[in-house]
Image (tube, grey):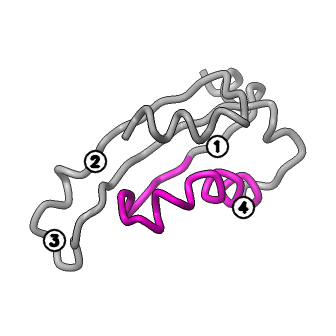
């Protein structure tokens, strides 16, 4: 899944991409009917001038087929500009 997500995020030309599979934390939970639980960090200049909500929507749009096909059940997205990312480091 890491590579599938990365390939779909390629149009953003990310400077940083981190992926965590958190599916093991949700085994046996009510409503867990398949699909993985993931967290990603995406750092890209494409986010410059965009609100946090707009960034989330952009990422979700690029990954829509993975949600529709139920390969992703839940996704935590941290989408930052390079300035934000390196300022926090």
Q: Is residue 22 above or below residue 70?
A: above
Q: Give the camera-side residue of 39 and 13.
A: 13
Element type where label 3 sits in the image: loop
Residue identified by numbered label 2: 22
Q: Position of residue 35 (x, y in %)?
A: 30, 61
Asked if the residue under mark 2 is in contact with the one under mark 1, i.e. CB atoms within 8 Å, the reply is: no
Rendering quarter of residue 37: bottom left
Seen at 36% across and 38% down, the residue is 20
- Return the x and y of residue 45 as percentages of the image width and height: 80, 31
Tell me what residue is drawn at x 54 percent, y 37 percent: 41
What residue did someone put label 3 on?
29
Looking at the image, is 83 positioned above or below residue 48? above
Q: Which mark is residue 53?
A: 4
Horizontal side of residue 53 vs 71, given as left or right: right
Instruction: Say what secondary structure mark 4 lies in.
Output: helix
Q: Which mark is residue 79?
A: 1
Which numbered disc flags the more N-terminal residue, 2 or 3? 2
Residue range corresponding to the magenta coloring: 54-77
Give the spatial CA distance, label 2 vs label 4. 23 Å
């Amino acid at each position: 899944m890491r590579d599938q997500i990365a390939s779909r995020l390629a149009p953003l030309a990310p400077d940083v991409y981190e992926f965590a599979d958190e599916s093991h934390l949700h085994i046996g939970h009510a409503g867990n009917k398949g699909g993985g639980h993931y967290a990603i960090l995406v750092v890209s200049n494409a986010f410059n001038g965009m609100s946090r909500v707009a960034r989330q929507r952009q990422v979700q749009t690029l990954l829509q087929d993975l949600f529709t096909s139920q390969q992703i059940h839940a996704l935590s997205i941290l989408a930052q500009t390079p300035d934000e990312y390196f300022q926090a480091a």
